[in-house]
Amino acid sequence: MTESAGGASRYLDTEGVYSRVAERLGRAETWSLSHHDAGLGNETLFLGWGSRRFVLRRPPLSETAGESHDVRREYRVLSALDWTDVPTPRPVLSCDDETVAGAPFTVQQRVSGDVLRHGEPVEYATPGYRETVAEELVDTLAAIHAVDLDDVALGDLGHPDLSTRIETWRERFDRYRAATDREISGVDAVADWLAANVPASGDRTLIHGDYTLANVSFSRSTPPELVGVLDWERAGAGDPLVDLGRLTAFWFEDERERAGLPTTVVPGFTTREGFPSRSALVDRYERVTGRPFTDDRFYRALAVYEQAAVCEGFYLRHLRGESDRPAFAALADAVPALLERAERIIEGEER
């Protein structure tokens, strides 16, 4: 039995998917395929295979969304981390045949837990458990950065240096702005400041590339336990403070910092009483890793600038009719607000 989701899933050759999965898992008397609406980058579909649960991932099929969605890179990283202490979904298969799903796709085991995208479970809503959520996030990030790249055969994974990264995002932002045909204050000023303030190169570790509450899964039971780090398509071997900058930039301490971002993009419940401050997260990271968080304004401003560029791409998909997500329409105002926030970080007005 096959259930095929609507929308983007209509481009799937469902029998082709069944055949490829059956080669790896054996034939299933019952199976299902349904679209998961929460994912914003790569398209995510839930795959039922008898009593087992998996996730199928493929890049968005639109030209607008075709950058930074490398599911094959994600599969390689998951395969390398499968037997480490980093909690990750177990990879099952990678398929390069684009006739099956319109693009390369991968299948991985579905983690038994919840992404806290829309809020924390009622059971977590105590000061002690909120502290545990933060500790789990930081300690898991430290474990990612402690992975020996050569031991897991990821030493050649690569990642653009910070100067190249800034220019790449600037060029992408310029293309998106040209397509949306709107002026956005602060784009050039923030990029110029970042380019002029690149820190000296430091450690080189495995980095996730998009490490926030939106990309991890927690247990459904208490005490909170981080049971899976998801969405590795932007992973690389590079500066670990990029990850810490992103985590702290989107660990909000007040509503203004959210800059109008919908919870579907970044969870906002860390503004609630009892969640530790950003500085507490940094203190724990420095204590666990022995690595100081230097140039914090740079790394947080970089994270916010990159998020603004990503959101402008999402907004362009909305304008072109490539997505009907209500959250994408709301990003028209969020992008300028994100750039204003980046400028506040640069000026030291937000700590």
Image: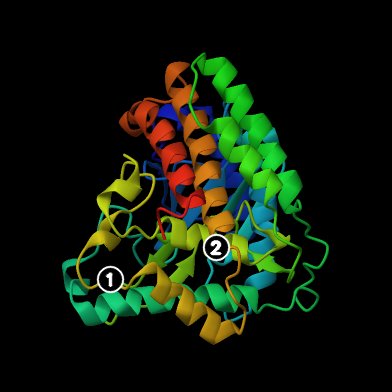
- The Cα–Cα distance between marks 2 and 1, rounded to whole angstroms, is 20 Å
Residue for point 74% across, 69% down = 202
Number of marks in the image? 2
- Residue holding disc 1: 275
Asked which secondary structure carries label 2, the reply is helix
Residue shown at 40% from the left, 79% from the top: 135
- The kind of residue tagged 1 is Phe
Disc 1 element: loop
Identify the residue shown where x is 44% and y is 63%.
216
What residue occupies the far top of the structure in this picture? 181
Q: Are marks 2 and 1 in contact (CB under 8 Å)?
A: no
x%, y% of residue 35? 40, 41
Which quarter of the rendering shows the N terminus?
top left
To which residue does mark 2 refer? 296
Where does the image place residue 132, in percent across and percent down from the top left?
33, 80
> Residue 331 location, x and y as percent?
38, 31
Q: Residues within 10 Å of mark 1 (few under 14, many from 20)?
A: many
- Quarter of the picture containing the C terminus is bottom left
- CA neighbours of label 2 inside 10 A, class few (<14), some (14 to 19), many (20+): many
Which mark, residue 129?
Answer: none
From the top left corner, tell me how far across and down residue 302 is, in percent.
57, 49
